[in-house]
Amino acid sequence: MRNVFYPAAILCVAISMGFSLPAEPAQSQTSRGDGIFTPVISPVAAIDKTGRPMTVEVTQPEPSFASSMIAGKLTGDSYVIHFPTGDAGGACIYSGTGRYFIESTGSLTFQMLADCGKLRRGYSYMICMLDASLRCTEAPWWYFKDRTYAITNQGVVINGSTVRPWRDAAEAPQQLQAMAAKIKAMRDRFASRTDPHVVHTRFISCRDYHPETKSYGIHEFATTCLVKSLCNIPNVDSLRDGERIDWNSPVGSYVKQQNKASDLSNWVCWMRTQ
């Protein structure tokens, strides 16, 4: 078993797999929260020209934020732009709505929206990283860990039933195809899955969250063993990468046995290929 501890603030280094993040212009007033326990705060343009697949705005879509993103509630910060002719913006107030979009890095993101005078601001949290098939390659992060997310041409599907439709339904399939190609190109630069000389190993990856310190630990359990009869490792062939481990399954029982933890309420595990 391999164990690693991460402060959430180094998320961009820990999980971006070496992807280069686009530089933010100095005037964008973007705040780099960790995106897990604290939001990444950024301006929201009236017209999004990034080409990112983005859903319509939805009222109170995420239970974890139900008490914080109440319409009319102050966010606790402000957004002001100083012009020669005067200032624009002001204290930020939650609109009560949020939206989902796919970042250029391949991150499925949830963003709460706020009005700051006549300006808008977004408070974003990462749900999961996507693969070239637009499926989560990992279990959803802290605020989303008890839910499932899937990408379709119709929208973001939550828990297998609730659909948050794309804002531009006609353009969505083309945008999704372009995003999938971009993710594949980025991952191909850092992986050699097509190289017959590279041996890839499957792991059970787990995170145990410590919200009080805004940190998390990573634990990995091997699924191969030289003498299988001695290791008692369950078969994982039917589990795809990113699929969450059920604690009541043979694989879940194996993880509980290996880590000897009595409280797994803040743990989440999934399959991963390295």
Image (cartoon, helix red, strand yellow):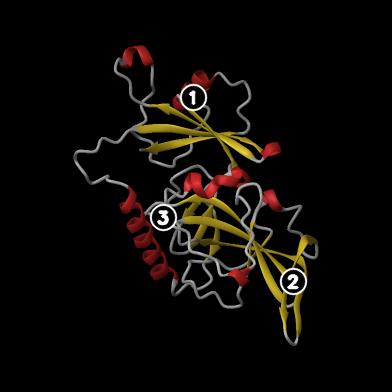
Does the image show residue 147? no
Farthest residue in the bottom direction?
Answer: 85
The secondary structure type at the circle numbered 2 is strand
What amino acid is labelled 2 in the image? Answer: Cys
Pick the residue in front: 1 or 173.
Answer: 1
Q: Is residue 178 above or below residue 66?
A: below
What kind of residue is marked 1?
Val
Instruction: Of the two numbered discs 2 and 1 on the same chain, state the one appearing first in sequence.
Output: 2
Give the residue type that dot 3 points to. Leu
Which residue is located at x 31 percent, y 47 percent?
191
- Rounded to the nearest whole Å, what is the CA distance between mark 3 and mark 2? 33 Å
Give coordinates of residue 118: x percent, y percent. 73, 78
Pointer 1 residue? 255
- Residue visible at 19% across and 41% down? 196
- Marks 2 and 1, how far apart in space? 47 Å
Say which element carries label 1. helix
For the residues bearing labels 3 and 1, Cβ distance under 8 angstroms:
no
**Which residue is at the far left?**
196
- Determine the secondary structure under disc 3: loop
Between 51 and 159, the residue placed more toward the observer is: 51
Residue 153: x and y in percent read 43, 64
**Mark positioned earlier in the residue sequence (3 or 1):** 3
Q: Quadrant of the N terminus?
A: top left
Assess disc 3: are there few (<14), some (14-19) or many (≥20) residues with their C-alpha within 10 Å of its C-alpha: many
Q: Residue at x 29, y 18 (%)?
A: 226
Residue 102 seen in this snapshot: yes
Q: Residues within 10 Å of mark 1 (few under 14, many from 20)?
A: many
Residue 116 numbered mark, or none = 2
Q: Position of residue 136 (x, y in %)?
A: 45, 48
Residue located beneath label 3 in the image: 134
Residue at image position (49%, 61%) is 103
